[in-house]
Image: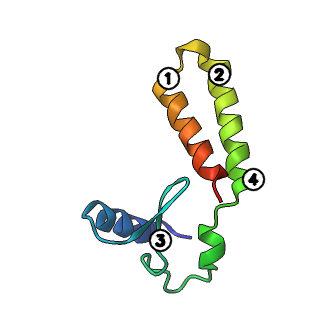
Amino acid sequence: MSIGDNIRVLDWIIRRVNNEDVADVSPVGLLPKKGSINLDGLNVDWDKLISIPKDYWASDIDETLKWLDEQLGDDLPQDIRKEIQKQKDRLSQP
């Protein structure tokens, strides 16, 4: 991947913030819709690239919260705790 390949994602981001219909809602946020990023010349499996392995994300959330608790303890804003819990809840849904 070269630095020039980053333009593919930047193009998608610009189109997204301009309210083009290029994103799908997922438990971890907005993800590019299939075909919304120019993959010409790349050998990628879109479904694998965009997959959300729930076990990975659940583990990552737990690790992140543990780290934040170790670093900030009670100083971690409750709003951040709430967002983390909401993400965990979204990931636990089928």
The reply to whether dot 4 and dot 1 touch (C-beta < 8 Å) is no
The reply to whether dot 3 and dot 2 touch (C-beta < 8 Å) is no
The residue at which mark 1 appears reads as 78
Residue 76, horizontal then vertical, whole percent: 53, 20
Of callouts 4 and 3, which one flags the residue occurring earlier in the amino acid sequence?
3
Name the residue at the top extreme.
Answer: 74
What's the residue type where badge 2 is placed? Answer: Asp
Of callouts 4 and 1, which one flags the residue occurring earlier in the amino acid sequence?
4
Q: Mark number for residue 5?
A: 3
Mark 3 or 2: the one toward you: 2
The residue at which mark 2 appears reads as 69
Tag 4 secondary structure:
helix
The residue at which mark 4 appears reads as 55
What's the residue type where badge 4 is placed? Answer: Asp
Mark 1 or 2: the one toward you: 1
- Between 11 and 54, the one lying in front of the other is 54
Dot 4: within a 10 Å radius of its alpha carbon, few (fewer than 14), some, or many (20 or more) residues?
few
Of callouts 3 and 2, which one flags the residue occurring earlier in the amino acid sequence?
3
How far is disc 1 from disc 3 in space, using C-alphas?
Answer: 38 Å
Tag 1 secondary structure:
helix
Q: In which quadrant of the rendered view does residue 89 lie? A: top right
How far is disc 1 from disc 2 in space, using C-alphas?
Answer: 12 Å
Quadrant the C terminus occupies: bottom right
Question: How are the residues colored?
Answer: rainbow
